[in-house]
Structure formats: structure tokens, C-alpha cells
Amino acid sequence: MNDAKTNTEPLKVFSSYQKFVVAVLAFMQFTIILDFMIISPLGAMMMPTLNITPHQFGWAVSSYAFSAGVSGFLAAGFADRFDRKRLLLFFYGGFMLGTLLCALANTYPLLLLARIVTGLFGGVIGSVALAIATDLFPLEMRGRVMGIISTAFAASQVLGLPAGLFFANRWDWHAPFFAILGIAIPAGLIIVLRMKPVADHLVLKQERSPLMHLIHTVAERRFYLAFILVTLMPTGGYMLMPFGTAFIVNNVGLSFAVLPVIYLVTGLCAVFVGPLVGKASDRFGKFPTFCFGTAISMIMVLIWTNIGHVALAWVIVINVILFAGIFSRMIPAQALISAIPGPTQRGAFNAVSASLQQLAGGISASVAGLIIVQMPTGRLEHFDWIGYIVVAVALVSLALMYFLHRQVLEVAPRK
């Protein structure tokens, strides 16, 4: 059995309720991703305002990831014991509290505290959303589901980051967090009022002890390969993105004012790329799509981390192609990995996966902060070293994904 429909077979059509669920999950992911991503473009403003070093800023980014990693493990034992809708609302409420604290923070220690609280709740939401998508959609539709949900990443660049930078330039770096809170509250209310309970897994036999459920999930040998992959996959983003704007301003030589243009154009292109990649992965196969995305990503990472002073147009072109490659890895990888756990293990599996992903991301951001050195002129040194590390990890991930793909071929018929 292949992991996708062939060219001659029609793709399944989404029902109206399925479209609503995908849209809601995508919008929720938009707010979560924007909250994390907004830190990066604000870095050039935060570091001088709070009088912090790149290493300290790296900790501001990674504190979210570390706290999210801890909360994922704590939540894993309970993740399959409740209606997934209620679980989603609980963590989304905590995320909004953390975002409010970010909006009110005026010192570096308070910012760290706010990011920790936000991570404790926000880091688990993605795993719950993925469990809901896996419960409601068969494997042959999940590429498109992941592709649509991934547009949240693009939309955060098209709408969120330019708007956030505008608010930051108009007022200060606190304003974007107030704006995120303003759109997160209505999203939460829509979920309360319109989403149906997601509780079919509760009729199946459950382990009585949450602790044993966590232990059995972590100890399940057939999960090991997937856990290794979700640990390696976020390395590139967490190492490169936190310092992206500082690199553009201080190394490439562009002004802070053009950053919204870069994010806007890149995001607009990514909005179309995500669903196309999802559809391609369902039709042509998720592993071949992942291979294509890995090749593109490695080439563009090497180009990006080694460029000097270039025109704005070249920066935009490089970013667009790079994110197309990233999406072509991320979307099929998520769809393939979602096929590994059974219905009564999806919540715990996704929670542990999210924890590993966040912890790996936190370590990656911290390591990048140690490697990169900011000169008195503002220029970032050793940024190219980060690119070489990212490419090496991508090659390892590609080899491991081959074996996971073979594992999915054995598991998928039982889904």
C-alpha cells in the first residue's frame, strides 16, 4: 500500500464540517505561530531596548521551547483521557494568559517569565490540534490537511508579522502581543460555540494510570524512529530564524523598514505553496515530496547563510524558495508521522513529540546563540556555521525518514 493516492485515483472531498475544523485549527495555529515568530523580527528592537546580548535573546526565544517541552511531557499521560476539544480550550486559555504577560513585560526577567508561561500552554496546543486532525481525517487526506494548516505559518508572515512590525514601529514591541490577544479571544469563542466534541477515542479501552500511559508511550519501540525525527526536524528553524532579522539588517545591509516587505512577499507565496505541497503529497507520495523539499532546503540554506550585501529582490527570492523547501519537508513529514500511533495513543504520542520538538528547538536556539558572535559594528559572525549544521542534520533526517516511510507502509492499512 502506498502512502498516498496514485495519479489515477480521485482525491477524497472534504465535508463542510471538515472544512470548518481545518479552518479553525489553521487560525488557532496562526495565533500560536505568530506569538512565537514575532519575537524574531522584534529582536533588532528588543536587544537595545532591554540592553541584552544575542545570547540572552537566544534564551528569550528558547525559554518558550523549554517550558513547552516540559509541559508536553506532563500533559502526555492525560492527553487521551479527555475530550480533545476541551483539552484544546484549556491550553488555549493558558496561552492567552501568557500572551497578556508578554504584552505587559517591561524588563528582561519579566519577559523570560512571560515566555515560560506562554510556552507551558502554547507548546501543547499543536499536539492536541494534530490529534484532532488525525482523528477526523484518514491518512490519504492528511497531506492536504497539514498543507492547509501550514498556511497559518504563511499567514503569520503575510498578515501577522507586517502588522506586528507596524504596531511595534508605531508604539513599541509590546503592541504586537496585545494585537495577538485581540484575535485569539474570538477564535476561542468560535471553538466553544461551533466545534463538536472529539471524544471517539474515549469509548476505546484506556489505561487507568496516566503515569503508566506516559511510560508506555515513551517506551513503545515502534515510536522511537518518529521521536528521533521530530527531535531533528525543528533544528533549522530554531537556529536560523531567531537571528534572521539581525542578519538581514547587520550583514546583508538592508534597513529595518524593509523587513515587512520581505515577510509579506514570502508569506504571500507560502500561502499558495502550502496547500499545493499538501495536495502533491497526497497524490504523488509523502516520502518523495519530503525528498524534494529536503534537497531544495539544503541548497537554499547554504546560499542564505553565505550571502553578503545583495539587493532586496534577491533576499526575497531566496526566502521564497527556502520556505517552499521547508514546507515541502514539514507537511509530508507531519502526515507520515501521524500514521504511527493508534487512536488511544495519539494524544500522548503527539504531546511527547511536541515536547521533544520544543526541547530540541530550545537547545538549537541556545547553541546558535553561543556560536553567533555580534561584533561592535552589529555584524553577526559565524552565521555560515549554522548553515552547515542545519544541512548535516537535514541529511540525517532524510535517511531516517526513509525507514519511517517503510514503517508507515506497514501501519497504514490498519488505520
Image (cartoon, grey):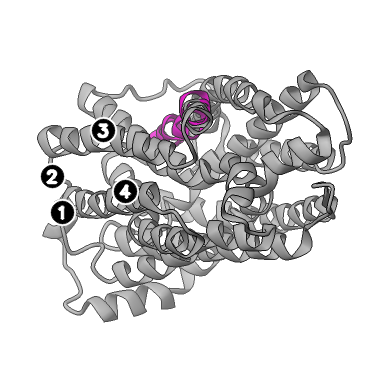
Mark 3 falls on what kind of element? helix
Query: For mark 2, does the 10 Å Cα neighbourhood hold few (<14), some (14 to 19), or many (20 or more) residues?
Result: few
Q: Which residue is mark 4?
A: 100
Q: Is residue 364 visible?
A: yes
Asked whether disc 4 touches disc 2, contact meaning CB atoms under 8 Å apart, the reply is: no
Task: Establish if 308 lies above or below 348.
Answer: above
Mark 1 falls on what kind of element? loop
Q: Earlier in the sequence, mark 4 or mark 3?
A: 3
Q: CA distance from mark 2 to mark 1?
A: 6 Å
Q: Is residue 249 magenta?
A: no
* Horizontal relation, residue 65 to residue 48: left or right: left
What is the number of the mark on residue 21? 3
What is the number of the mark on residue 26? none
Q: Which residue is mark 1?
A: 83
Query: What is the magenta range?
Result: 140-162
Mark 3 is on which residue type? Val
